[in-house]
Image (spheres, rainbow, N blue to C red):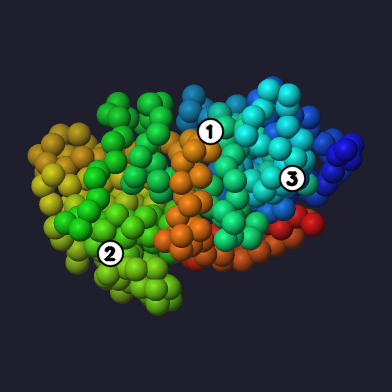
Amino acid sequence: MSPRTMRAIRFHEFGGPEVLRHEEVPVPDPGPGEVLVRVHAAGLNPPDWYAREGMPDVPPELRPPFALPSVPGTDVSGVVEAVAADVDGFAAGDEVVGLVRFPAALQSGAYAEFVTAPASDLARKPASADHVHAAGLPMSGLTAWQFLIALGHDHPSPFQEAPHRPMALDSTTTVLVNGAAGGVGHLALQLAKWKGARVIAVASGTHEAFLRELGADEFIDYTRDRPEDVARDVDLVLDTVGGPDSRRFLRTLKRGGALYPVYFGAFDDEENARLGVTVTATQVRSNGAQLAELGRLLDAGTVRVAIDSTFALADARAAHERAARGHIRGKIVLTVA
């Protein structure tokens, strides 16, 4: 039986990494359709620090509600502790991985010794991966998958009217990945290569050897060259940085090409039509079935998760400080004793 209390990271107010506290809190109880997971590792993602800061750059009408105090985190790898009576497919002792309740809950309590999760959000942990590497997969891997491979849901994006439909990738396709060394970027690069595409990776020069090892056919060091000035006739740009500067990649696209900014910025539909290009984005969503497909690619050696650094759960503040310094290679992960 689970202990009545557990250690977790919470924030009681919005602010910088210093608001994160290591505290004693009650162990959650799984509801209908849910699984209680003993956490072994929790992955960090940008929504963790956006929520910690109170999402100051997001219009109030687009902010998902969440109450304080909040236990951050959505990416988890661990072992099933208990299941609700109506759950089939998982049992106590199973090793699992998941993106928990995203985006319905911006923060789902993964920075803790235990977390509850809908069974549909979980997949079996890849046998070839330890918990640290598995915890780096869910949000970044599903973002890359849903942008590039298969959307897997019909929820409209709050930032656009047009639905997002991933472009078919094959040996005739050139894909440029901006921010290729980061969590989403390094997995997207590998998925594009799996589909046979030619991949141009954009990152700082210190990451070139790493990205070529992952399969990049061409590398652009953005500290030396502006990618929008040197890349041409690209079929697809996945801009994992996104935001207001994403429009600069329009000039790299051939007619019929597409730009997918992970963080949507301001675009002109008339300009896009004149250039003959498509600009769409989507919101990553929990999907246990897709996560299982990613897990099979890990087990096959087709994809691997790179780990930038690990921190103990109690050192979550230091992990967020590492994230704030940027230039992350792969994923930052919290380990839970």
Determine the secondary structure under disc 1.
loop
| Image position of 171 (left or right of 204) | left
For the point 79% across and 57% down, which residue is it?
337
Residue at the image position 43 percent from the left and 36 percent from the top: 283
User: Would you say 243 lies left or right of 55 here?
Assistant: left
Residue located beneath label 3 in the image = 93
Instruction: Find the distance from the CA under tag 2 to the CA under tag 1.
Output: 30 Å
For disc 3, the neighbor class at 10 Å (few under 14, some 14 to 19, many from 20) is: few
Q: Give how far across and how far down residue 164 sits, in percent.
A: 31, 35
Residue occupied by mark 2: 200
Q: CA distance from mark 3 to mark 2?
A: 42 Å
- Lower position in the chain sequence, tag 3 or tag 2: 3
Mark toward the viewer: 1 or 3: 3
Answer above or below: position of 122 versus 204: above
**As shown in the figure, which amino acid type bears the numbered disc 3?**
Gly
Report helix, strand or loop for mark 3: loop
| Sequence order check, earlier mark of 2 and 1 | 1
Q: Residues within 10 Å of mark 1 (few under 14, many from 20)?
A: some
SS class, disc 2: strand
- What type is the residue that disc 1 sits on? Pro
Is 97 displayed left or right of 84 in the figure?
Answer: left
Residue 268, image x, y percentages? 22, 37
Front one among 54 and 66: 66
